[in-house]
Image (spheres, helix red, strand yellow):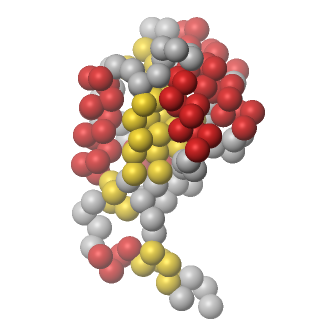
Amino acid sequence: MSKLLRPPRILLAEDDYAVGNLFLADIRDQYECNIDWVVDGARAIDFIGEKPYDVVFLDLSLPIKSGVEVLRYIKEEKPTLPVIVIADHTDTMDWMEGTNLGVVGFLSKPLSAVNFANIFRTYGIRVIPRCMPLNALLEVQPA
């Protein structure tokens, strides 16, 4: 029996429009995926509470509710949800706070050539590359 892979569900919580647009362009060029983009921490918490995500990319410096508050919510309500922090490489407090709260990975601003394949592979997120032939979308299951 075969099973069709589904595109991963990704939440991007980032208030910097330049960073968000670059992220969306990069990932959508490479993969079929469903991405929700929010620009404040309150919306991020709402979305995480309402929808199942495969991974969250989280800026810790969000308005309304900080990314740290979002991270605490995730770790309390959905502790197995992988979170990758997007932070300014010079802000060591963000990096330390994220590490203390169980972040699984970090991306440094400004973003450049993010290796999404490595991120997805590391966290077991199945993805569909845009250049994959249709017959490769079927996954063979043991009988």
Query: Which is more toward the observer, 68 or 143?
Result: 68
Residue at 48 percent across and 17 percent down: it is: 62
Image quadrant for the N terminus? bottom right
- Please state if 49 lies on the left or on the right of 55 as rendered: right
How many circles with numbers are drawn on the protein? Answer: 0
Q: Is residue 138 visible?
A: yes
Is 37 located above or below residue 28 in the figure?
Answer: above
Residue at 61 percent across and 85 percent down: it is: 142
Q: Position of residue 63 (x, y in %)?
A: 48, 14
Is 107 located above or below residue 8 in the figure?
Answer: above
Q: Is residue 95 visible?
A: no
Query: Which is more toward the observer, 96 or 28?
Result: 28
Is 5 located above or below residue 90 in the figure?
Answer: below
Q: Position of residue 86 (x, y in %)?
A: 46, 25
Residue at 62 percent across and 91 percent down: it is: 143
Residue at 69 percent across and 41 percent down: it is: 78
Q: Position of residue 66 (x, y in %)?
A: 56, 16
- Please state if 30 lies on the left or on the right of 71 as rendered: left
Residue 113: which quarter of the image?
top left
